Image (cartoon, rainbow, N blue to C red):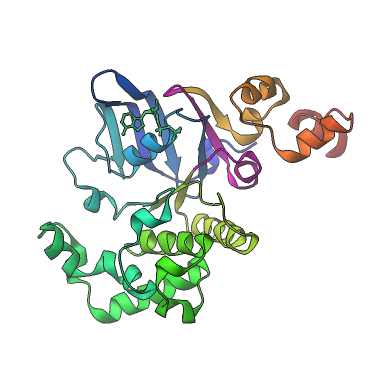
Amino acid sequence: IPKAADFGEPLVRVEGARYEYGTDEVAVDEVDFTVHEGEVHAVIGGNGAGKTTFSKLLAGLFEPTAGTVSVDGDSTEGRTARNVAETVGIALQNPDEQLSEQTVEAELRFPLEKRQYEKTGLLGLSKRERYDKEFIDSRVEDVRRLVGLDEEQLDEDPMFLPRGQRRQVNMASALMPDPDVLVLDEPVAGVDATAHRHVEQTISRLTDQGKGVVVIDHDMDFVCEVADTITVLDDGSIAMQGPTKEVFDRDNWEWLTSRHLLPPRPARLARQVGIEALTADEFVEQFAS
Ligand code: ADP
C-alpha cells in the first residue's frame, strides 16, 4: 500500500480550504489535501459533493473563502489564475469551455503566446511573454506526443473533433506551460476506448516525469486503475482520505455505495457470482507468501 512517503516533494498543499457560493452555499469546507511529485491523487464523491469547486480552488480559478492553497510552498493568495496555471494546469469537465481557436495547433500555442496577455490585459505577469516561436514550436511537438495527438490533427478545428480528442486538446493546452500538477475533471467521461487509453498513458508519462496528477471523478473503475491516493468528499467535507486500497476496503463498500460510488467492477463481479472479494491484506496473506 503506497504511503505518502513513497512520493516526492509536495507540489500543491491545501489547508483548511472553504469555498462559499454567495452567503449560505458552502460547497467546500475544511479540506486538507496534498499532491506530491509522482502521485496520482483522485478526488471522488457523489453529485454536489464539491469536486468541481475543489478542482477550481486547486487551479487558482477560485480563491478560497478561508484556508490556503499553496503551490511549491507559496500561497496562491492574490495570484491570478493565469499565473497559477504555470504550476497547476487544469482540463475542465466540459472540453468546449476551454476551446477558443480555429485549429488544434493554435489552441496549443495560445497559452504561451503574448497576445493572450494583450487580449486579457494581464501584461507583465509572466516569464512566458518571453517565449519565442522556436520554443513554442518545440513545446507543441513535445506536448502533442505526450497526450497522443497525431501530427495531422494539429490542422483540424478542435470544435469538430470527437469529444475524446477535444479532451486530449484540453490536456495538451493545459500542459503547454509545463505545470508541475495537472488537474483532470472527469477525463474519461463519454470518451471512446482509444481516448481513454491516451488519458491513462498521459497520466503515467506525467508521473514518470515526477509531475503530480489530480483526477476528479466518480468513475470508480478508472479511479481504481490510476489513483495512488483517494480523497472522498461528502457534502463539501472530507469523508475518507488515504491509499486507494484502504479507501476501497470491503468495510467501506456499503458507505461508498450509499453515495453512488460503486466499488470497482472486479469486486462487484466477485460479489455477484457469490465469491467474497478479498481485502488487500487477505490477498497478500493468501498469494504473496
Ligand atoms: P460536484 O462537482 O461534486 O458535483 P460542485 O462543486 O459542482 O459538486 O457543487 C458543490 C455544491 O455547490 C453543490 O451544492 C452545488 O449546488 C453548489 N454550487 C455549485 N456551483 C454553484 C454556483 N455557481 N452557484 C451556487 N452554488 C453552486
Q: Residue lying farthest top?
A: 24
- Residue at 65% x, 36% y: name it: 1
Q: Is residue 217 magenta?
A: yes
| Rendering quarter of residue 122 | bottom left
Residue 145: x, y in percent?
49, 72
Q: Residue lying farthest front?
A: 160
Q: Is residue 150 left or right of residue 86?
A: right
Q: Is residue 285 visible?
A: no
Q: Is residue 225 above or below residue 231?
A: below
- Residue at 14% x, 58% y: name it: 120
Q: Nearer the viewer, residue 73 or 213?
A: 213
Residue 181: x, y in percent?
40, 50
Residue 28: x, y in percent?
36, 26
Q: Is residue 147 above or below residue 184?
A: below
Q: Is residue 205 magenta?
A: no
- Residue at 46% x, 27% y: name it: 49
Q: Is residue 32 above or below residue 203?
A: above
Q: What residue range appears in magenta?
A: 216-237
Q: Quadrant of the C terminus?
A: top right
Q: Nearer the viewer, residue 18 or 206?
A: 18
Q: Is residue 131 above or below residue 247?
A: below
